[in-house]
Amino acid sequence: MPTVVVVGNPKPASRTAQAASLLAEALTEKAPDHVIDVTDLGQGLLEWENPKVLEAVGLTGQAGLAIVATPTFKATYSGLLKLFLDQFATAEGLRGVVAVPLMLGAGPTHAMAPDLFLKPLLTELGATCPAPGLYLSDKTYEDGVQIAKYVEAWGGVLNDAVAGWGARK
């Protein structure tokens, strides 16, 4: 089952992308199979049935594990990420995908945002989110401390969920 990282940051090759890839590697012990930097989809996000966007949607929908990452904008996920997730044609577009909502921010003020805002959107699309979302400081995520704590606490649950869904797909 592939691991997909979806990055909803308007800046290409962002800290958000790096943090999401670090989390994916910590959870699976290998680099993600696909990194979808949504900003690379450009104008296609405003079109229905754009081939590049459909390919990205397809890869995400076939993931065993999807790390869905965004910077924190106005206490919630980016509009860019929302444009991408709106491309899923049905409310079941992420059915069978185990998702981890990941958000980066400048401080702890919005630490609940992954669970309050991003997780409900992912579950609305059919994803299973068996663990809490992860909020990381965009200034300290590189030290890996919070990622290691998250993996220690929730890695087994996430890996079991991926294995369970994989048997059903």
Image: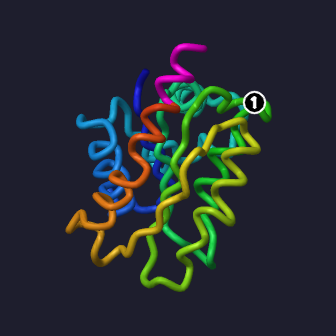
Q: Which residue type carries mark 1?
A: Glu
Would you say the magenta stretch is mainly helix, strand or loop?
A: helix
User: Nearest the camera: 164 or 92?
Assistant: 164
What's the residue at 59%, 28% (across, down)? 61
Q: Quadrant of residue 93?
A: top right
Q: Is residue 169 visible?
A: no
Q: Position of residue 156 (x, y in %)?
A: 40, 40
Q: Position of residue 3 (x, y in %)?
A: 40, 32
On-image quarter of the N terminus: top left
Q: Quadrant of residue 48?
A: top right
103 vs 97: above or below? below
Badge 1 crowding class, 10 Å Cα cut-off, few under 14, some 14 to 19, many 20 or more, is some
Q: Is residue 101 left or right of residue 35?
A: right
User: Nearest the camera: 13 or 50?
Assistant: 13
What's the residue at 38%, 75% (across, down)? 137
Q: Is residue 165 visible?
A: yes
Residue interval drawn in magenta: 162-169
User: Which residue, given by chain and number where applicable, does mark 1 sit on?
Assistant: 92
Q: Position of residue 151 (x, y in %)?
A: 35, 51
Q: Position of residue 27 (x, y in %)?
A: 33, 42
Identify the element where label 1 is drawn.
loop
Q: Is residue 143 left or right of residue 16?
A: left
What's the residue at 32%, 36% (across, down)? 32
Outermost residue on the left side: it is: 143
Q: Is residue 89 left or right of residue 139?
A: right
What's the residue at 67%, 28% (across, down)? 95
